[in-house]
Structures are given as C-alpha cells and as structure tokens.
Image (cartoon, rainbow, N blue to C red):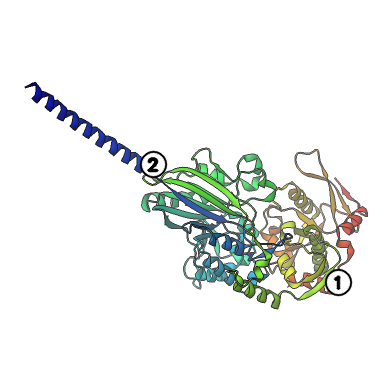
Amino acid sequence: MNKKKSQKYINLNKRFYFIAILFILILIHYFYLNQKTSKINIFYTSDGKGVFYDIDSYNKVRGVMPVADYLSTLKYQDFLLFDVGNTIYKNPYTLNDNAQYFVGFMSKMKYDGLCVGESELSWGEKKLMNLASKAEFPLLSCNIELEKDENIKGNVFTPYIIKTIKNTKIGIIGVTDKDIFKNNLEKNIKSFTIKPLFKTLKRYVKLLKEEERVDLIILLSRYNMTHKDEYLSNTFYQVNNSLIADEIQGIDIILAKSIPDEYASKVPDAYISSKNKTIICNSFEGEFKSIGNLEIIIRDKTKTMVSFSNQQIKPTIPAIYLKDKNFQFYDEVQKFKKTINRKYNIILGRTNFLLQKQNIAMLTVDIMKSATNADFAIIKNKDIRSTISKGKIKYRKVIEIFPESQRVVLIKLTGKEILDILELSISDRSSENIVISDLEYKVDEKSSYARITELLSSGRNNFKLDEKYKVAILERMLNSYIDQDIFRKAEKISVSRDTIQELFLNYISTHVPLEPKYSYEGLKKERKNFQTLYEI
C-alpha cells in the first residue's frame, strides 16, 4: 500500500515538474518574443542645393554623387532614404535642363521621399509638376496645396506616404515652413496656398494612427530646429520643431532641415522632446557635405522603440576617381562635365582679387543704382549665393551668384523707412542683413535693441527722414518679412527691362579687370572717406 502511495506521489511530482518546466519554457518563449528586436536604418539629407559634385580645396569630391557612392557600399540595402528639402535648387547645372537630370539621379539612388522647401517652390507650379511626374519618389508636403486651376490637373504634393521595413509599418509626413512664401518670387508661388500647421498635422497624425494603423510616424520638417529657446530667441522662429513635437502627440521622429552654421556648435545631433518624447534629428552642412544616419532599435512584438543613435557622416571620394573608367559613376561624370563645359565655361571677365559675398553685394547695389538712376539701392546678403575667386570669371559663376532671373524694381521710400529697414536688418539673426549703396552707419552697442546712432555717406550731403527717395531693390524683396511689408507697400515707379543676371554679366564683361575699389582693401579705404550724413 505504501509503495502504491509512493509511486502515486512520484507521478504527481513528475507531472508537477513537467508542467512547471513547460510553464517556464512558455514564459521564456513569451519573454524572448517580447524582447526580440530589429534594427532600422534611416538616412537623410537636407539643403542639397542641387550640387551634383564639387571638388574642394583638399582635392576631395563632395555632392550627391559621393553620397550615392557611399550608400552603394553599405553591406545592407534595406534602409530608408529621405531628403528634408531645399535640394532641387536653381544653379548652372540644374537650370540647364530644369533639374531633370539631377532629379533622375536622385531617383536612381532610390530616395523614398523629399520634403518640399523654398528651392522646390522656386521652380513654379508647371516646372515643379513636370519634375514631380518624372521623379521616382514623392514630393511631400501636407500643408502646401496647389490652388484649383482649370489648366492644372491634380495636386503636385503628396501629404504622406507609408513604408514597411523589417515588418514595421512607418508613416512619413512632410511639412513646409510658411516663410518660404516670403522668400520666393511672386510669379513662382502665386498658385500655392498654405494650410494651418497644427490643425493639418494633427489630422494626418490621427489618420495614420487610427485608419492606417502605422507603428511609427516620421515627420520631415522644413521648420527650424531648436534645442533650447535661447538659440532662437527672435520672433521669426516662433514655430520650431520642439514646439511641434510637444504640441502634437503621436510623432515619433522629426528629421529637420539643415542648421545654420552659427548654431551648429550649440545644438546636438539629436535630442528627445520634453513632453511627448519625440526624437528630433538635426541636419548639418547642406550641399550634401554630410548625410544623417538615424539607427533605431524596435521591439518586434510591440513595435516600440528601445533605443536610437544618430550620427553625421561626411561622404567624400578622391578627385582622381572622376577620371577612372571603372568608377561606377564615370559615365554620369562625363555627361555632367560635357554639359557644363559646352555652355557655362564661357569667360566673361577677370578679377585680380577675391570677392567675398559682401564685396559682391557692394558691387551689385552700385550696378542696380546705376541701371535705375536711383538714390539708393538695397540688397540682402542672402541674395548673393556664391563668391568669385581671383582669376577668370566664367558665365556659370554669374548663374551661381544669381540663380533666379530677378528684375530690379524702383520704389519710393522715406528716409524714416530706410532707417527702419536698416535697424530691423542689424537686429535680425536670420541672415537677412542688407547692404545699401552710399550709406554706412554706426550702432549704439549699449542698447538692447540695435539702434543706429549715425548715418554716414561719401556722396550725399543731406538726408531727411520725411523726404522720399528712389530706392532700387530686387524683385524677391517685395515678399520680404524683415521689413514688415515696407517694400511691399511702397509706391512702385518702374521695373528694369534686364534681369540682375544680365546687368551683372554686362558689367563684368565691360569692366576687365574689375576695379580694385571692390576688393577688401578698396572697400576699407572707401569707408575712410565717409562723413556723418545724419545724426540721430
């Protein structure tokens, strides 16, 4: 009897141990499934400015071609590739065929999407629609629409796309900064409208989460970065990616546009927003000088992010590769060089000194003033897109400096309005500072607000705040925001027949070599002759 009880006890124990082991194995399996992760790689570029390739002073090649070369050498090819915009840019190379070759090359790289920026809109609706139809990737913007027009069919922009990688369903939204409307020619943007930012974003985030059932949402944002508010304290950047991240729940990752050089050392590659824990990745160095690489670890079961890392990679290749027939992009290089040499290497003039952007701005306002018989001429520093090296000046350099065919507009401004524009310019942090012909100024360094205390000139013996003056400006300045609509509301007198490209080209061709007064030393000497014109 005892033996039977003992055997029964042993059998119960065996069953118990078997069930316990099975339970433990189930727990381990469940735990393993919940802990199993996948790695997703996301590469992103921004503000490429149409650079196919460029050789720097170290004889290294940079541009979209070296980026393509770098990506092709990766051991893995299952990654996402985005551009945050301002990349389909007007320069001598893209203007040759309205950017079709450049966009075609980006298509070969298998970009997954591009966010619409200022440069993309600068092509105007018809050319942009043509590019969108040729591109093998979508142009993304959820808040910019094309107004209905009987001659235009369909919407040129896609609000969002969905990509699946490593069994993870990802929604990608593009959003465009509204201020791009104020930095473009009226003729290029007249057919576009902008929708309310936060209302529109909330709508698409909700749609992706509730209807499309995506696991993650990535926002490609043309809005500015900020890590801490003090980096962007001026009023022109009230909306930024930190604010978007904290105001709109459900955005997991924001890929931001390139950071201005002056902020680059103050802002991290990536950080997590304080409220909704959104990962915000900043882009550094446009013109394809760097490419961002965000690596995220995702739990396969729950599709939640475990960790992330972000880095900036600088892809370059030795210039000697361009001559190597075995180089994978050798044919593209030859086609590119042939196109440029045929049209843009025509020599127009010569300079015996380097012209930085400031020097070119001073030369340009003198050209504008002379062409329109104005009292003053004004230009923004950012309207000068390149420098001129010592030596021969080629046609392509003029196109690099002025990619937009803008005309010179003659308007009337009072002395008070001119003074207001100057003070707004020097108090602004957004690279909107202006250059004005025939005037210099002194600033009260002790004042918290940039206040001009003295105007100086070498050619004018009076200046009255209530007097009206003829002022020459570039066409795009009519959309400027720094001036609080002073330019837009001003009385317009005339518009030049020739574009600024044509005026500048003609001057370079007829003043060989360029006068020394536009060199650094010449401008410095000229300033010594300036006398007080108006004291505040």
Kind of residue indicated by mark 2? Gln
Residue 98: in sight, yes or no? no
At 43% from the left edge and 57% from the top edge, which residue is drawn?
A: 163
At 78% from the left edge and 64% from the top edge, which residue is drawn?
A: 388
SS at circle 2: helix
Query: Sequence order check: which comes first, mark 1 or mark 2?
Result: 2
Name, please, the residue furthest toward the left: 1
Observer-nearest of 486 and 91: 91
323 left or right of 144 in image? right
Locate the C terminus by quadrant: top right
Kind of residue indicated by mark 1? His
Say which mark, if any, is on residue 511. Answer: 1
Number of residue marks? 2
Locate the N terminus by quadrant: top left
Name, please, the residue furthest toward the top: 2
Q: Is residue 210 above or below residue 70?
A: above
Which quarter of the picture shows residue 344? bottom right
SS at circle 1: loop
Q: Residues within 10 Å of mark 1 (few under 14, many from 20)?
A: few
Say which mark, if any, is on residue 35. Answer: 2
Name, please, the residue furthest toward the front: 3
Q: Residues within 10 Å of mark 2 (few under 14, many from 20)?
A: some
State the image coordinates of residue 229 (x, y, percent, origin top left). 62, 40
